[in-house]
Amino acid sequence: MASAPASKYNSHSLENESIKRTSRDGVNRDLSEAVPRLPGETRITDKEVIYICPFNGPIKGRVYITNYRLYLRSLETDSALILDVPLGVISRIEKMGGATSRGENSYGLDITCKDMRNLRFALKQEGHSRRDMFEILTRYAFPLAHSLPIFAFLNEEKFNVDGWMVYNPVEEYRRQGLPNHHWRITFINKCYELCDTYPALLVVPYRASDDDLRRVATFRSRNRIPVLSWIHPENKTVIVRCSQPLVGMSGKRNKDDEKYLDVIRETNRQISKLTIYDARPNVNAVANKATGGGYESDDAYHNTELFFLDIHNIHVMRESLKKVKDIVYPNVEESHWLSSLESTHWLEHIKLVLTGAIQVADKVSSGKTSVVVHCSDGWDRTAQLTALAMLMLDSFYRSIEGFEILVQKEWISFGHKFASRIGHGDKNHADADRSPIFLQFIDCVWQMSKQFPTAFEFNERFLITILDHLYSCRFGTFLYNCESAREKQKVTERTVSLWSLINSNKDKYKNPFYTKEINRVLYPVASMRHLELWVNYYIRWNPRIKQQQPNPVEQRYVELLALRDEYIQRLEELQLAGSAKLSDPSTPPSGPAQRMPHVHTHF
């Protein structure tokens, strides 16, 4: 990793608006004019501070706080540093030093962020100068603790595309060829009475009545019954998702649940066994019996085979990401890089998630068996596995809108607990429910896109933009834990969708190497030798890590495509001009060479 001088850099997100630069002559400038502001964003305060930059040392600047962002610009003539941090990204705000603290820049605020960086500001000790900044930041970064609305409900941005229209479950199931003779759409959960964390619309076996579903729900954790996620277009095997059965220490059985899984198996008469993938390590699944959970045993569930995928729980993943942050921010230690990275176990967890998804995809693609996937409650590891397997199996999900539908369907509508895992607007930074499960999924997608550079319509910027707005609270897309909570809060009526931003400027997020292929199954190599740390995400705040953005090969390819389009357009114009001359009777006859002028190109 090459180091480079870094006196000037922008550390705002890739997606943020372009920032107007003011002159640096120091004469009567109104710096506030250069602060970007969204419709609905209001300025709260500004203050002169010293930003303790971990890369360039202390920098004098002015910080502006709005109800959406913290924005700092340097006041020093030799530095053009800008920080643009959505308040939703802030995880923790602490006071640094006290009134009697000695030493330069020892008194101020320490801010921990959710996107792999920390910020430190020093202020003057006189007159409790940090108190108002601390209180304002705390108030607007954690609005839920102060009975304030999350910014998404105040955002008045308008786009020419409505992102809320991207996902229509009936249309998506119709695209998959559903309903059919074996699978039906049920509205039993229309008012979220069967399961309050499932979507209103579910696909279930044709032979299972709504009363059967109610009985099965009593034996599944959180009433999350087995329902269809995806059906293979040719062999008709399916991916089904659910939560763990409530077996408990006494080994309870439920005939309705056992029969229901057999009905799922029989929807495809060619298969003799149903494969169940339990995402947990075996020891964890056994331990869950103590709290009333468990797994499907051979003696109770005939015609099934059960495999454990050894993917660890949310607490292990949270600690692993903390270790990644420790080794990438603020400094990357070159001498022990590989051993430090290995000690985080992050890539090991990525490998296990990808390996599990490959197994699911391979079983379904082979046509030998349908697959049931669950973990404990079916909203974390289960979502990772079903979404990645569907991405491997179905090329539709590799397009920009297809991927948006995949996220809306498998993550948002099926109740991944975004509010609990991310902590939108919540000050409880040490909450045990916080975990980077969705980040891990996006990392897996990025690993796949590296191995199959022509298979995805979207580029890296698309994935990073999704992650930036996972935290930003600018859009309503990732707010709340489930569909029923979003409906109660009228999120689609009162907020803007992230897909509105992306789909109104799709070219920005397109992969120029994309080649559309139908029915090609992708099997990434999930060995440690083929996985790498996503430097452009995890280490993007460090200006000394040389990032190639955009990729020079990609940039040149885009230029050549534009040049090709230009020449094709010119050729068409000349052909039209030539045919117009031929059809004009007043034009004297001419030789063939004169009729069709030569087009000279660089190729």
Image (tube, grey):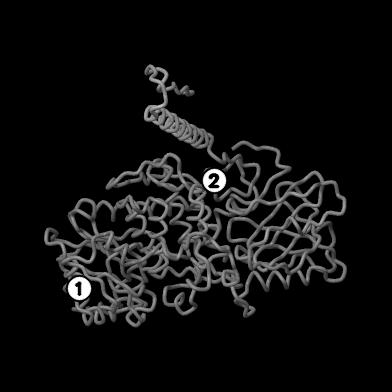
> Which residue is outermost to the front?
586
Q: For label 1, count other residues whose C-alpha is less than 10 Å away and answer few (under 14), some (14-19) or many (20+).
A: many
In the image, what residue occupies the spot 42% across and 73% down?
483
Picture layout, residue 445 above or below residue 167: above
Position of 318 with respect to 587 (left or right) is right
Position of 326 with respect to 459 (left or right) is right
Point out which mark residue 208 bears.
none
What's the residue type where badge 2 is placed?
A: Val
The quadrant of the picture occupied by the N terminus is top right
Q: Are marks 2 and 1 in contact (CB under 8 Å)?
A: no
Position of 512 with respect to 118 (left or right) is left
Picture layout, residue 54 above or below residue 68: above
What's the residue type where badge 1 is placed?
A: Tyr
Provide the residue designation for mark 1. 260
The quadrant of the picture occupied by the C terminus is top left
Instruction: Give x and y (percent) for residue 182.
Output: 17, 67
Picture layout, residue 47 above or below residue 578: below
Q: Earlier in the sequence, mark 2 or mark 1?
A: 1
CA distance for labels 2 and 1: 46 Å
Provide the residue designation for mark 2. 535
Picture layout, residue 302 above or below residue 214: above
